[in-house]
Image (cartoon, grey):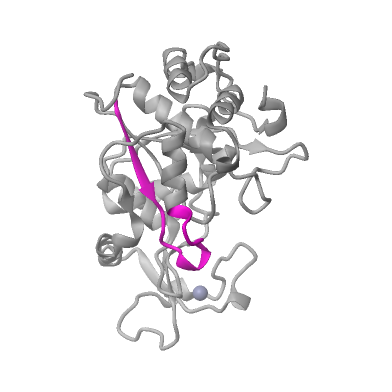
Amino acid sequence: MPTAGHSAYRGRFAPSPTGPLHLGSLLAALASWLEARHAGGRWLLRIEDIDPPREQAGAADAILHCLQRHGLHWDDSVLWQSQRSAAYDSALAALQAGGHLFACACSRRELGPMGDCRRGCRQRGALTPEKPASPYALRVSVPATFSAHWQDTWQGTQDWPLGATLRDFVVRRKDGLYAYQLAVVVDDAAQGITDVVRGADLLDSTPRQRLLQQLLGYASPRYAHIPVLTDSSGQKLSKQNLAPPLEATAPARNLRAALAALGQASPPAHASSVEALLAFALAHWEPAAVPAQPVVSGAATP
Ligand SMILES: [Zn+2]
């Protein structure tokens, strides 16, 4: 099996330790692994542990163990977002120096239904000279002229003319924690990620991330959003709706189900080990067969 590559391709899998991996997360891990290995590139792992209140004790270790059990071995050492505060602070400083941030001290009740600031904190402007005395979030001023445009491997041409509609979003929360959008962008750049493969539920984060990349002077990676897995009622499989954790089930069976959901050829019955399944999947990897639309989890299981 090909391992660490010579190509410039650098992919990643970036789970949050808010609970164990489920079949939906395996789909994202497997698709990004297959893309990276198929390209002869590297596949990196990042644990997005920047939101302690939402994290579950032991979940990060369980995720690492679960990936190994499924034969998805990563290159280099794991990047832990909890150790990246200095990098996030310098990105915030750069954004602030560019005049892209403002302080928003709005309470939860004052925010709009989408968590947007409607009190005109942006017009009141800069962080200086008088910072608000109460706790405040840092938001990015979205330029009115901003639009996001990219060619998505599975979701096709993406055109988001957002300047007028994209809300000024939070990059550092009122409780002092760094926002997901900021941490992802800083770390994708730091890890030299060329290709982001992830679930289509994150599609609408991509314009915000592309804006931050632009403001910070980073190159934008290519994006490939795979379909989300849903249950039979159309609900996305997630920790919140109690998708069964993968540890409870057999790795070979999980890999077969994930390959089926990705529209890939079914490995022969004699490919029973995790290694044999992955070798088959890699040799027969057919990106064009990956469906763009959500896949019902039950229907994907052979
Ligand atoms: Zn505000």
Name the foreground residue: 283 vs 123: 283
Farthest residue toward the left?
6
Residue 113 at x, y percent in the picture: 65, 65
Answer with left or right where residue 161 lies relative to residue 7: right
Which residue does the image show at 58% across and 37% down from the upper left? Answer: 23
Residue 135, horizontal then vertical, whole percent: 44, 82
| Quarter of the figure that contains the C terminus | top right
**Foreground pick, 99 / 273:** 273
Residue 280 is one of the magenta-drawn residues: no
Magenta-tinted stretch: 41-60
Q: Quadrant of the N terminus?
A: top left
Across and down, in percent, residue 90 comes to 24, 63
Q: Position of residue 51 (x, y in %)?
A: 45, 64
Position of 107 compared to 218: left or right?
right
Compared with 18, 75 (above or below) is above
Q: Is residue 43 magenta?
A: yes
Which quarter of the figure has residue 32?
top left
Q: In this orientation, which residue lies closer to the viewer: 101 or 189?
A: 189
- Residue reaching furthest right? 233
